[in-house]
Amino acid sequence: MNNINRNAIFPGSFDPFTVGHESVIKRALPLFDKIIIGVGDNIAKSTMFDLNKRIQIINKIFQSEPKIEVKAYSGLTVDFCKKNNCNYILRGLRTSADFEFERAIGQTNKLLNDNIETVFILTLPEHTFISSSIVRDIIKNKGNLQQFIPECISPDELF
């Protein structure tokens, strides 16, 4: 693993992208040369927002950050890493249940490609309870989204 770049993939469905996602990425920026936000396109999974809308929103959030790219992907994350010359997978952890789930995926990814490391960043305490599922429920019921989504996103963009 000589001359390893410090490029990372931050994979997820981001349906929708939350302040928790934003915080993990901003806090990870000093650790990496580039972070590619890999927006998962899983046709078997029903999403609230289509792929293009999710990418559009994330691009808006990070429009002034040159170290971030946003790309759609499907298939294995390790294959997406290899295709994009990334040696790291970045994941945020909210709870111990997240850790157990992510640990199993990280260990599987390591078996699939020994050159890729998974890096975990803990969410801030004030974001621990925020999940995309909760935010989708708030959207469905037309609740106040402001504290759950990044500042630059207007709630009207999600209703």
Image (cartoon, helix red, strand yellow):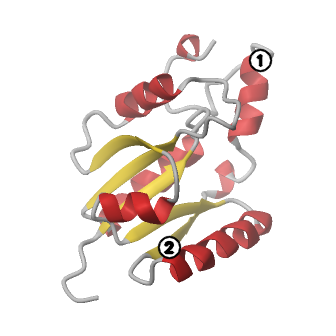
Counting from the top left corner in percent of width and height, residue 87 is at 35, 72
Left or right of 2, for residue 99 = right
Circle 2/circle 1 CB separation < 8 Å: no
Q: Residues within 10 Å of mark 2 (few under 14, many from 20)?
A: some
SS category of the residue bearing label 1: helix
Judge whether residue 28 can be spotted in this image: no
Q: Where is 148 relative to 85, above or below?
A: above
At 52% across and 77% down in the image, what residue appears? 112
Q: Which mark is residue 118?
A: 2
> Observer-nearest residue: 145 or 55?
55
Answer with left or right where residue 54 lies relative to residue 9: right
Q: Quadrant of the C terminus?
A: top right
Q: Is residue 120 visible?
A: yes
Q: Identify the residue position indicated by label 1 in the image.
A: 140
Number of the label disc, if any, that sits on residue 89:
none
- Residue 54, given in percent of the width and then of the height, sits at 50, 29
Of tags 2 and 1, the one toward the viewer is 2
Q: Give the side of residue 52 with respect to residue 30, left or right.
A: right
Amino acid type for the residue under numbered disc 1: Lys
Q: Residues within 10 Å of mark 1 (few under 14, many from 20)?
A: few
